Image (tube, helix red, strand yellow):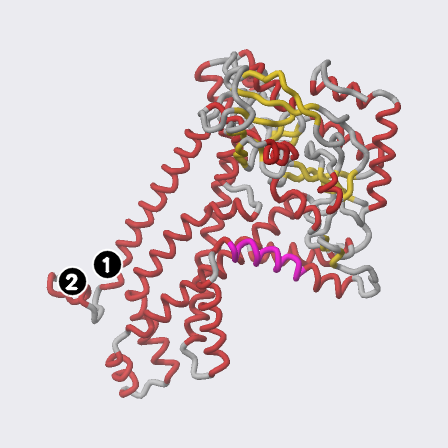
Amino acid sequence: MFSACADPKSIEGLQWLLCYLTTGKHVDFYWSFATVLSLLAITAPVAMGFGFAGAMAARSQILPLRWLGKGYTGMVRGVPDIVFFLFFVIALDQGIEWLNHQVQCPDWTAPIRQGLEFRVCPEAKVPLGSSPQWLHKLYGFGLAILTFALVFGAFAANVLYGAMQAVPRAQLETAEAYGMSQSQVFRRILVPQMWVYALPGLSNLWMILIKATPLLFLLGVQDIVYWARELGGAKTSAYEYPHGDWRLYYFLFLLVFYLSFTRVSEIILGRLTAKLSRGQATAAGEAMRKAGI
Amino acid sequence: MKKLMLATALLALTAGASMAQTVRMGTEGAYPPYNFINDKGEVDGFERELGDKLCEMAGLTCEWVTNDWDSIIPNLQSGNYDTIIAGMSITDERDKVIDFTQNYIPPASSSYMALSADANIGEGAVISAQVGTIQAGYIAESGATLLEFATPDETVAAVKNGEADAVFADKDYLAPIAAESGGQLVLMAQEVQLGGGVGMGLRESDTELKEKMNAAISSLKADGSLNAMIKKWFGDAAAVF
């Protein structure tokens, strides 16, 4: 990166360290933090959307929709995350390619499954074999986001379902007495009041989601854990910057990163709880009213 | 992001048939000097140089991809990449599920590396090896206790911190580590010949690509440039054709 780093073998001390920490590989490591953060930034709202839809479906008057909502939460919550991650991503990827194959190559005669091989025509590969590597990475990242959102959406659905049930019946009845329709009651009374009941569960989910991001590594996305292991391993002089086994320091750094990230989240979520409790017909809201906050 | 993904999907769908053949080369990127990720973050090593040369001779465009060792065969079969060029020895078990080109490294020795030259490596010893390698298979049958790790680096670290009595791997991988350890680690005298040399792994249905690669390897062998490349990366003592 810097001209002083052109010959790493001749420099030492602090400058060596500075050069070492700015190699292309380390820049990849720093970028992987952006990968993890953008995964969280995209997954959280999408999972919330899945959760909201799931909770609404589970409460629906229409029986098949109710089955769908309950089936979704029941299935995903009942399968270990790792199994779901390993199975779902492969199944989804092959499913997309299979569908694409049916559209693109109708006259393809060779079987798609040949023993252990999964072989669609070259035009049906997603992304195409000739696509640049970043496209493959983006596709993998997209699959990861969808999988994370599905898993955490199922948990969020259950939390939101419980929160909707927890809103006092009297509140809803009063609204009905004022002549509001079912959808008006839902929009104006139920949803605004349920957040305070949902927040403890959702904040738990957020923490678990942060801590689940190393699962990206399992999905072949080169996340911070991948790079920490890769960079920390002992390096011989085949590399420009040989060093011993430094995995301890790299993983310690990740530990600090995750701890401070969850700590900041805790503080923000605490403030949000206080804000949402104000004026609510809950014990916390009542306490705030009495204290005059 | 969503829009970008949608656009990407559309692009992938419509890009269609008119493409030059791109071969995706799958490697582990953690086994110097065979293959490793250098400080620029690119795949480097003997197999990078060889692979690029082979692609150039066969008139193919090649793209390098890294994948964990333990899922490197399944991901070849499901089409994530088209070749495995990762120091993989040709064995009968592997040949049942994938195809190999002719070897581009002759059958080489595997050795033990330990903290002292007289360490126990027989009955009752704990030997570390990378999961799914011929070395791990050998240790499992040798009577010693096998300690498996996902990456080669961890197998060496296990010896340093006393978890294992010795590590068993390709000699070409261990030799530079022993030489640079400042006497902490020593290669043991006993060497074992395993496997039929290192070859490039391909899907069994990819016969056309196999022919192209075989032809390119043959001509590299014939003009001696493969031997020169082996000596460049593995030293003058390395086995050549």
**How would you classify the magenta stretch by its main secondary structure?**
helix
- Tag 1 or tag 2, which sits nearer the N-term? 1
- For the magenta stretch, what is the residue range? A83-96
Across the whole image, how many numbered discs are drawn on residues?
2
Q: What kind of residue is marked 2?
A: Met
Residue B43 in view in this figure: yes
Q: Which mark is residue A288?
A: 2
The chain under label 2 reads A
- Which image quadrant: the N terminus of chain A? top right
Mark 1 neighbour density, 10 Å: few (under 14) some (14–19) many (20 or more)? few
User: Which residue bears the numbered disc 1?
Assistant: A274
**Does A89 appear in magenta?**
yes
Q: Is residue A205 above or below residue B191?
A: below
Residue drawn at x 42%, y 52% as measured from the top left: A209
Residue at the image position 42 percent from the left and 34 percent from the top = A251
Find residue A15 and report its horizontal and vertical position in percent.
47, 17
Residues under numbered marks 2 and 1 in contact, where contact means CB atoms less than 8 Å apart: yes
Q: Is residue A112 left or right of residue A90?
A: right
Please tell me which residue lies in front, A98 or B180.
B180
Q: In the image shown, does A266 or B209 lie closer to the viewer?
A: B209
